Image: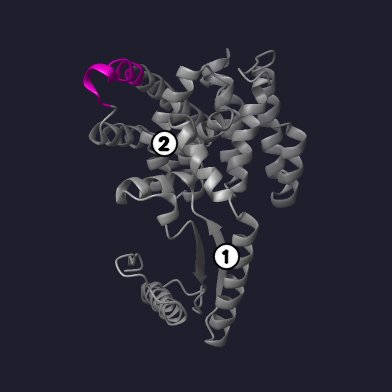
Amino acid sequence: MKYSVFQNKLKKSYSGKDVELIDNAYKFANDAHKGQIRASGDPFIYHSVAVASILQELRLPPVVLAAALLHDVVEDSTVTLGALTKGFGKEITSMVDGVTKLTGQVQRQDSKMLSVLGNRESNGKDITDEQAETIRKTFLAMSDDVRIVIIKLADRLHNMRTLKSLPMDRRKRIAQETLDIFAPLANRLGMWQIKWELEDLGFRYVNPKKYQEIASSINRNRVEREKRIAATVARLQKELENNEIIAEVTGRPKHIYSIWNKMKRKSITFDQVNDVRALRVLVKHKVDDNVQTLDNIDHKEQSAIADCYRVLGIVHHMWNPIPGEFDDYIA
């Protein structure tokens, strides 16, 4: 991504002082990475800008965007931590240092993954769930600042978006590592949009044939299906308004990796998956947000739960629940 495009986005949501900090970080990183080219053929700095842009879409503060722009300068240039501290202070330098250390850990893990994949034919195993969990815990333990992990997740997301530039063996290895380590990390931090994209991108390279089969199935009758979803959204939204429930109703397709997991778990075909598309209802409860007492916070939580169950009751009144397919994630 070119910085001018990113800068235009910044000016719409950040103050002049914040944009100045981010501009300075970009100039510093651009000088540090001058002449460096990614495997895609793009200037290296495009990656740094893309990572910062992902975090800007999440509305993260300017110091995090600055650190994102600078996240590779220590690892991939002659810049020292001392020079970084002098230019941007301890907070940003600490985040860059943390990302650099995490990257080193990822590279060590990548070497282990290569060994595992190389031995797969003899032992029939990928990395185990226990090994993956240990690595995830190690990443979190190495980062006393959660912002470091968030920057690393954005870094991995952009690398996955541009993965096709790498040789096939590296694509598959990195994709498997993404499914084992990074997507669950994003889930643990509540970064679901990033989790979903990491999973779909990872699955695309780990099992390209099955990915294409499911993607093609989703696209069948797509226009008609989207019309039905839009009509259902409007119908449910009106019913909630009639019951004086303030909520936002949206339709969304189920993600490809999620569909595949359900097909495997239940040993069913694509046509037997009932929730290829789904509705999401976000309730907005009426509580004074200016009063931050423990009682008020507890009341907000109880009010939200009650509203969710009211919505669920309305949904079950409008459509019959399918036996054996109902999971209560509210409680």
**Magenta: main secondary structure:** helix
Residue 80 in view: no
Q: Tell me the magenta residue range.
A: 112-125
Per the image, is 120 magenta? yes
State the image coordinates of residue 198 (x, y, percent, origin top left). 48, 39
Residue 1 in view: yes
Residue 78 falls left or right of residue 303:
right
State the residue at coordinates (40%, 24%).
106
Along the line of sight, which residue is nearer the eye, 89 or 26? 26
State the residue at coordinates (77%, 35%).
4
State the image coordinates of residue 89 (x, y, percent, origin top left). 56, 31
Q: Earlier in the sequence, mark 1 or mark 2?
A: 2
Q: Residues within 10 Å of mark 1 (few under 14, many from 20)?
A: some
State the residue at coordinates (74%, 51%).
12
Verify CB contact (< 8 Å) between mark 1 and mark 2. Answer: no
Along the line of sight, which residue is nearer the eye, 22 or 253? 253
Q: Find disc 1 in the rendering and name its residue.
A: 250
- Indicate the quadrant containing the C terminus: top left, top right, bottom left or bottom right: bottom left
State the image coordinates of residue 139 (x, y, percent, origin top left). 35, 33
Instruction: Determine the image quadrant of residue 131.
Output: top left
Instruction: Determine the image quadrant of residue 19.
Output: top right
Q: Nearer the viewer, mark 1 or mark 2?
A: 1
Per the image, is 52 magenta? no
Q: CA distance from mark 1 to mark 2?
A: 27 Å
- Amino acid type at mark 2: Phe
Q: Find disc 2 in the rendering and name its residue.
A: 182
Along the line of sight, which residue is nearer the eye, 133 or 91? 133
- Amino acid type at mark 1: Thr
Q: Residues within 10 Å of mark 2 (few under 14, many from 20)?
A: many
Along the line of sight, which residue is nearer the eye, 275 or 187? 275
Report helix, strand or loop for mark 2. Answer: helix
